[in-house]
Image (cartoon, rainbow, N blue to C red):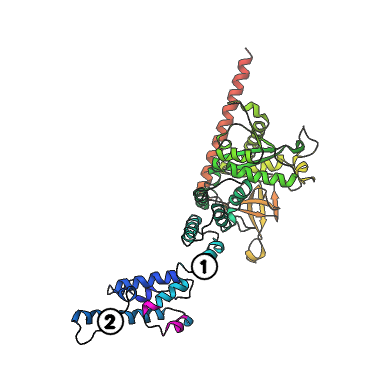
């Protein structure tokens, strides 16, 4: 804002700030800055002094001349930064003070136009995806406070609902929690929840999934899978459905959010109401918000006695089945253990589509109402050749890319495939599988070291198991 000589640069102060009416507050703030720097404030704060005569003292003459000079400079300075229609309207005003007084009445903080402008800004401001949500909430709260100062207060619920509505689509779950659960939030609660989600998005941004058709990516070797070391196994039991769910949680604080999403989904699909839930006394299920949500929605929360996992046998048995399947899949596939998250989702996908001893139909058929096809099931971890779209390939190069099958998309048809060369995960339905091949080409030295270390660990573990089994058999001979 200063030039090379150290003086204030007028053009920099008023850059992109031509007065149009609604922007009067910002325009006036910059005019005050310019006026204060050059010491022209007297022409705005005071009326024009009496014109001196021959008998006037020298000090009065100096004051008058100084006021006239400041007034002329400020008047034409302000006119130069107005739109044409306003400039023509104020061209014949006698002083800078008279211009400011008129503008204050039309566009000032106490004018109805200013209040309406603030209200329009409050209800129409929308945050774009990727922008700072926390700062956006702070700005919206400040805007609401300014409206209150101007005599137009807004109640707490309207503030929260308006701010939530202004957030992008990635905050849909947070909106559902507020509007569906009916929890009594304060502005501080909203700010803390938005901040927590923003921080989580920043952490995940370094190593998260961003799948879009065949151009989506997941950086492997990253912490995406390592971070989500915990998973929640749930089960719906409408009409003995026994359909299982898996939710991978980064934080225990997400339990209520995941549960509300789960409840909305299953009630919509089954046309039944959730009446009760069973838990193992995990701390995430005994938070004040979780308990309040259950009470307000008439959901009875049953729990097992302390330190008795056998009382929650169905869930514990399902956990063991899942982990056994994942171990078997990881042992056969030539993939790092960081893919365990993809493996457990694939295992659940299969379990929901096969019959059990207790049911004549599959859990998926009972839940959805139609038989689930299993013709798309492929060997997990096998080599797969993915068709490269015409728009993304050279005419003289291969039409396919060698990848590894790692799962099934949850919201589309096709397959999830890991590309070891670019270390990303793709989604595609145009795939040819080599289900007896598990060798991976294109991995770098660091990945090879990880795979070799895991193979040695698996071999050592199996040898230890065989030696223990042999010793037991030998001991039983005595």
Q: In this view, does 451 lie above or below 141?
A: above
Give percent across and percent down for residue 451: 55, 42
> Nearest the camera: 469 or 75?
75
Residue ID for mark 1: 117
Q: Is residue 408 above or below residue 12?
A: above
> Nearest the camera: 278 or 342?
278
Residue at x-position 45% and y-position 70%? 108
Which is more N-terminal, label 1 or label 2? 2
Q: Is residue 464 above or below residue 443?
A: above
User: For residue 44, what is the image quadrant?
Assistant: bottom left
In the image, residue 119 lies in the stretch drawn in magenta: no
Q: Is residue 191 visible?
A: yes
Q: Tell me, for residue 50, which label it has, or none.
A: 2
User: For residue 310, what is the image quadrant?
Assistant: top right
Direction from residue 24 to residue 306 in the image, left or right: right
The overriding secondary structure of the stretch rendered in magenta is: helix
> Nearest the camera: 235 or 456?
235
Residue at x-position 65% and y-position 41%? 297
Where are the magenta residues, as a range? 86-98
Q: In which quarter of the image is the C terminus?
A: top right
User: What residue occupies the far bottom of the structure in this picture?
Assistant: 54
Mark 2 residue element: loop
- Using a 10 Å C-alpha cutoff, classify the residue at mark 1 as few (fewer than 14 neighbours), some (14 to 19) or many (20 or more): some
Mark 1 residue element: helix
Give percent across and percent down for residue 143: 48, 60
Give percent across and percent down for residue 460: 55, 32
Q: In which quarter of the image is the N terminus?
A: bottom left
Direction from residue 317 to residue 185 in the image, left or right: left
Q: In this view, does 307 lie above or below 381?
A: above
Q: Is residue 438 visible?
A: no
> Nearest the camera: 104 or 255?
104
């Amino acid at each position: 804002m200063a030039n090379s000589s150290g003086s204030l640069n007028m053009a920099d102060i008023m850059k992109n700030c031509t007065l149009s009416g609604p922007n009067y507050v910002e325009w006036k703030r910059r005019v005050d800055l310019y006026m204060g720097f050059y010491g022209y404030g007297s022409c705005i704060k005071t009326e024009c002094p009496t014109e001196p005569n021959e008998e006037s003292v020298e000090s009065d003459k100096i004051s008058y001349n100084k006021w006239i000079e400041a007034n002329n400079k400020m008047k034409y300075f302000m006119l130069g930064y107005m739109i044409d229609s306003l400039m023509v309207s104020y061209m014949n005003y006698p002083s800078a003070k008279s211009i400011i007084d008129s503008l204050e009445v039309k566009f000032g903080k106490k004018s109805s136009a200013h209040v309406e402008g603030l209200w329009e800004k409050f209800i129409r401001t929308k945050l774009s995806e990727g922008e700072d949500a926390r700062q956006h909430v702070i700005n919206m709260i400040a805007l609401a406070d300014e409206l209150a100062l101007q005599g137009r207060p807004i109640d707490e619920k309207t503030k929260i609902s308006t701010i939530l509505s202004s957030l992008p689509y990635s905050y849909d779950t947070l909106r559902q929690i507020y509007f569906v659960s009916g929890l009594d939030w304060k502005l501080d609660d909203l700010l803390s929840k938005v901040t927590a989600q923003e921080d989580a998005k920043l952490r995940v941004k370094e190593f998260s999934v961003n799948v879009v058709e065949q151009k989506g990516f997941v950086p492997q070797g990253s912490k995406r899978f390592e971070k989500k070391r915990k998973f929640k196994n749930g089960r719906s039991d409408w009409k003995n459905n026994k359909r299982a769910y898996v939710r991978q949680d980064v934080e225990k604080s997400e339990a209520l959010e995941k549960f509300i999403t789960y409840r909305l989904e299953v009630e919509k699909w089954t046309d039944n109401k959730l009446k009760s839930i069973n838990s193992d006394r995990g701390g995430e299920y005994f938070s004040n918000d979780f308990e309040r949500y259950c009470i307000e929605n008439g959901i009875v929360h049953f729990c097992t006695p302390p330190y008795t996992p056998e009382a929650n046998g169905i869930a514990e048995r399902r956990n063991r089945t899942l982990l056994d399947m994942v171990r078997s899949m990881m042992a056969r596939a030539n993939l790092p253990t960081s893919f365990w998250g993809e493996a457990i989702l694939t295992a659940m996908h299969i379990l929901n589509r096969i019959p059990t001893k207790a049911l004549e139909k599959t859990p998926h058929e009972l839940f959805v109402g139609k038989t689930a096809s299993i013709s798309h099931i492929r060997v997990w971890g096998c080599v797969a050749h993915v068709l490269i779209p015409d728009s993304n390939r050279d005419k003289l190069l291969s039409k396919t890319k060698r990848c590894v099958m790692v799962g099934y998309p949850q919201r589309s048809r096709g397959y999830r495939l890991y590309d070891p060369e670019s270390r990303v995960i793709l989604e595609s339905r145009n795939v040819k599988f080599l289900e007896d091949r598990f060798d991976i080409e294109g991995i770098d030295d660091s990945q090879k070291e990880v795979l070799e270390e895991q193979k040695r660990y698996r071999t050592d573990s199996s040898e230890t198991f065989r030696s223990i089994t042999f010793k037991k058999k030998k001991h039983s001979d005595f």
